Structure formats: structure tokens, C-alpha cells
Image: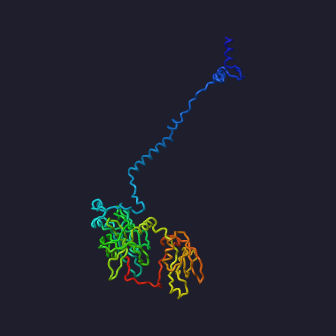
Amino acid sequence: MEENKNFTQSTEYNPTETKNNTKWFSDDFETQVKNAVPKHCSLAIYKPKPKRLRKFLKSPVFAAVVSSLVTCCLCLGLFAAIYQPPVSYGSVLPQSGSASRAQGDIVNTATRTADGMLGIPEIYDLASPTVVTILCQSQSSGYVQSQLSSGSGIILREDGYIVTNNHVVEGASKVTVNTIAGQSFDAKIVGTDARTDLAVLKVESNTALPYAELGDSATLRVGEMALAIGNPLREELAGTLTVGYISAINRSMEIDGKQMTMIQTDAAINPGNSGGALLNMQGQVIGINTAKSTGYDVEGLGFAIPINEAKPIIESIIQHGYVTGRVVIGISGLTVTEAIAKANNLPIGVYVQEVLAGSAAEKAGLKMGDVITACDGQKITTIDEVNKIRDTHSVNEIMTMEITRNGKTMTVPVVLQEEKPSSEPEAAQPQEPSYQQPYSQQIPFPFSWFGW
């Protein structure tokens, strides 16, 4: 028994030395195995890695991410199912062939010829719902009572944009639009352009409005038939149709001091027709009726703004509220004719009558009394020549003017500004005033021009 006891003690407590003089206890199995096996035959003990993926899948973060993705997918699917994209107008105005037809699909039911022409009754049924009556009320002041005037307009888009003439709504404090379907709307003036005599209105309607199809005025030929729809004289005659022919194209003329290129037609155009539609035999708008000549010996001389010239003006007004990209100098002046020059010892040119505050002209140093004799190296004798050279420039470009001041000649560089409406809050954004020629000799016309 005693020997046994000694053996046990030595096994359990006495350390034993190995070859490399390391000590270990008899119950240290791992150390024994490690030291007992040669290094070149050492064992690789496999220890399984913790299952992190399974742990992540059970975590609250993963559950939150999955629930968020599922919710987003359900919302997007529901949105895609019920969402109806708005009507895309491309270049703001509807393209040819996309007109919304009123009261039935007239295009499908109408009889067209091989070249797409329609009969006159079909054209009227097609286009008349898109031509409206415009009633304008001017604001009364002092002893001047408010006046009511009328004109015509053309619906351009189903969301209520309407084009008419600037002189129809000029000075109006309230504008009302009536359709031949009996609807009446209060209209807001989006913007106007006196140079081209165009204005754009906007009405709010709970339903889509029928709108006109715009044609291509560049393809017109003299002798083609033309139809005019509008509101002559008074509202009771709204929707009046007159028929004629294209008498001339690209007719350049001055109306109310503005040089304009017009379509001439012998279709009857009367006061109140301004802003109405001039149509081709496909029912497309090719012009906006604007003016006619009057006189006891004048008949059949009506004029319309070509729709190709009106489109960029309309688009710019719809998008920006005014016509962008136009340059302005900021002066008003008088043409110095040869007779005026001799009488006042001035050179022939343009006499600067006024320089607008904050304008490009004022910043360049132009002063009242200067006489402009050349622009960009070209001699000028009239205001129209100054305007033509000005219009070849873009905003912020330099227009060089040669002026005479107190008998001295000098060159002035003018950095042209963009013309903006005077109603904008930005200070010193002048509109180019209309020029006058009270002293120049003019050849009287045999008849007068009137715009309605």
C-alpha cells in the first residue's frame, strides 16, 4: 500500500522533465500529446468557426432591413399601378397631329381626301370649339369709366393656355374667356409681347379643354384656301366663319409702328377677329388674325401672324413669362434727317432723346443729346438700321457705337442687356421704348392700317 501511495503522488504531483527540459504534470494530457509527437508529425486540431451568418439573420437589424425593402417594393408597385403620367407637350406646344378633338372624334368620322384635306363644315366642327371669345375690362380712374372690349383667342393646350393679340388685352384689368360650349373663365395674363403683338392667357378648368392643331405656315402657297374663325364686332357673333384665299405670304409691313411679316388673306376679318384662327384645309392653324385695312375703297385686305413666327414667342412666354434672348440698348431717339441736320448743325444719324436709368446705354456713358452715326462700323441714318444691327447680337455682347457729342466724335462700346418686362422686381431692366419720327417726312398711305 505504501508503494502504491508513493507512485500515485509522483504521478499526480511530481513534474517530469522532457527532452527540451520542459516540465509537465501527469494529468496534463494536452501537453503530453504535444511533446510526445514529433514536430514533423504534429496534429492540426480543427476548431469549427462560429456561424455568424445565422446569427445575423436572426438579428433585429436584418429584420428591419428586410421589412423596409418589402414595404418599398409594395409602395412602388402600388404607385406604378395607379400613376398616370401627365401629358407631355415636348416643346411646350402640342405637335402637329396631336390635337384634342371636341365632342366626338371628328377626325375619324370626317371624310378626308387623299392629301388629308377636309370639307369646310368638318373644319368648322373641328376647329370652332378651340376658338374663344375674350372680353377685356379696363380699370376706371377719375372721370374715365371702365370700358369693355372684345377679341378672339385660340386654345393651345388642354390645360388652358390661350394665345391672342397683345392689343386685345393691353391695358385690361380683368380678362374673361368664353367658349362656344358656354363655359366662362377668368383668365390670367401669362405674358405679352408688343413687338409681335402676341399675348398668352391661362384659364383653370376642371376638365380638359379642346385645343387647336398647329400647322406649318412655311408650306403655304398663294391661292390656297384659308378659313378664319373668330368673334367679329361683338360676342353675339362669336364663332363666325369666313372663307377666302391666301393672297400673299411674307408680306412685310409696318403696323402701329412695328415692322411685321404677315400672311395676307381676303377672308373677311373684322374688329373682334383679332387673336382668332386662320386655318388651312386640314383644319390646322396657320396664322393668328391680327389686322385689316379699312377705307371706303378698300376691301378684302386681312392679315395674320404666321404660326411659325408665333410659336417660339408663345413657347418663351409660357416657359418664362416673357420673350427671352432679346437684347436692349435702353434709349429712345429721333431720326436726324438731312433737313434737321442742316437746321440744327447736327450730323445725320439718331439723336438720343432719353437714356433709361440702369440701362446698357447709361452704363456705357451715352447721354441725352448724343447723335449716333455708326454702329459696329456701319454708317446708320435711321433708327430701323440701329435696330437691325442690334438684333444681330446676343445678350452680353458688345455693340460698338460711334457718336457725336458737342462736335466731338467718340467710340462707345455698349454691353447689351436682355430685355425683360418692366413689371419684374429686378431694378433697372428697361424695355426698349418705341421710337418716334415726328420731324421726318413720311409718304402718306392711301389707306389706314388698323389692328383689332
Q: Is residue 432 or residue 349 the one in the foreground?
A: 349
Placement of the C terminus among the 4 image quadrants: bottom left
Q: How many marks?
A: 0
x and y, in percent, of residue 115 in the image: 31, 62
Q: Is residue 8 above or below residue 111?
A: above
Q: Is residue 61 above or below residue 36?
A: below
Rendered image quadrant of residue 233: bottom left
What is the residue that sits farthest to the top in this orientation?
1
Q: Is residue 325 or residue 67 the one in the foreground?
A: 325
Q: Is residue 303 or residue 148 the one in the foreground?
A: 303
Rendered image quadrant of residue 443: bottom left
How are the colours assigned in the image? Answer: rainbow
Q: Is residue 63 or residue 72 the one in the foreground?
A: 72
Placement of the N terminus among the 4 image quadrants: top right
What is the residue that sits farthest to the bottom in this orientation?
343
**Relative side of 227 to 43, left or right:** left
x and y, in percent, of residue 241 in the image: 29, 71
x and y, in percent, of residue 130 in the image: 33, 66
x and y, in percent, of residue 450 in the image: 38, 78
Would residue 203 be visible to someone looking at this image? no
**Relative side of 416 to 74, left or right:** right
What is the residue that sits farthest to the right in this orientation?
21
Q: Is residue 65 above or below residue 179?
A: above
Would residue 23 be visible to someone looking at this image? yes
